[in-house]
Amino acid sequence: MSESIALVLGGGGARAAYQIGVLKALVQLYPRNHHIPFEIISGTSAGAINATSLATHASCFHLGVKKLDWVWRHFETKKVYHSSFSKVFKHLCKMALKGLQSDKMNTDAGSLLDNSPLRSLLNQLIDFQRIERNIGSGALKAISLDASSYNDSHSYSFFQANSSVSDWKRARRQGNRCTLTTDHLMATSAIPLVFPSIKLNQAYFGDGSVHQLSPLSSPIHLGADKIMVINLDSPHQQHHNEVDAHPKTATIAGHLLDTIFSDTLNSDLERLERINTTLALIPAADAKLINLRKIDTLVIKPSEDLSEIAARYFKELPLAIRVLLKLFGVDCETDSSVVSYLLFEKAYTSALIDLGYQDAMTQIDTIKQFFNIDQ
């Protein structure tokens, strides 16, 4: 019986371009007409968008990666959120007026930026009907997208899968079968305060990383035996001249984003490793009694600080966004990761794709072994 391999793509805004570079290294190990080597795909935030695009091309891995590579290498900020002076100012004025209205009159979601262009882009690029066809043909077993409910503070895994998968419910998290749509992608990628929340099934949802207590829960519930994780947590070296100074608002905001997008995933990977170590010490029969099984993982993460790379391309941001960020104390010299999440410009995203490819190639032998590819 073959092992079910899952792909987990975490969140991180523009940082998700790095995931495409890793996939480019992996895809070259397979023939051109080969299906994706993952039965299960799980994505959160921007990683959910990459995951969904892959799922729509599950029958042809090369085509799926090629399409994602083209999109990310031609990205512009205005394709994700309005970035001209007129539209940014208009949106901020609208938000200011909303703050003066009563809760009964104020029915629209508040946000720093207007990401309606992203909805148009997703509608143009993703054919959701292909997901069900790929599941029906056996090219894909399941795909799940994680979103956070602002109503009950729970994490929801919205999944589309074959009939062998059932809904699940655990403490503050659950998996619900559904037919995925653009609304699910808009919800899982709605960074708190930056982008507006999305209404799904009579509740309001935001970025899937917020209440995500166990990012690996979804692929495991969907039946994964092995999990490949493309983690967007990058090394960061503190500037010595800032050790004795109070952290700036921009620095704190960057820490908050790093915490939302990376900390729970790193903790869950540590937890999984401890469980695997424990299972190795007890008989297999006893492991079955406690309903635990060994899950092998392969984790690939950036070898360079993505914040420093983003700082080099800061001037690629539209002027209106640079001015807006400056009001919050963010510029090219600021020790903050905020820019690395919002810089949807092709010079930066292309650099991340190239880095992802290089990092994966340095581990190519490990990757071959994980996927049981002949050396």
Image (cartoon, rainbow, N blue to C red):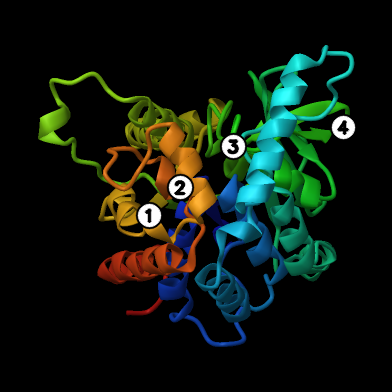
Amino acid at the residue labelled 4: Asn
Separation of residues labelled 4 and 2 (CA atoms): 36 Å
Q: x%, y% of residue 272? A: 42, 35
Could you say which is closer to the camera, residue 55 or residue 141? 55
Q: Earlier in the sequence, mark 1 or mark 4?
A: 4
Point out the image quarter for the C terminus.
bottom left
Q: Earlier in the sequence, mark 1 or mark 3?
A: 3
Measure the alpha-carbon separation of dots 2 and 1: 8 Å
Q: Give whichever of discs 3 and 4 has the lower sequence position.
A: 3
- The residue indicated by pointer 3 is 191
The amino acid type found where label 1 is placed reads: Phe
Query: What label sits on residue 322 in the rendered view?
Result: 2
Residues under labels 2 and 3: Cα distance? 19 Å
Residue on which the image places disc 1? 314
Residue pointed to by mark 4 = 201
Q: Position of residue 159 (x, y in %)?
A: 74, 45
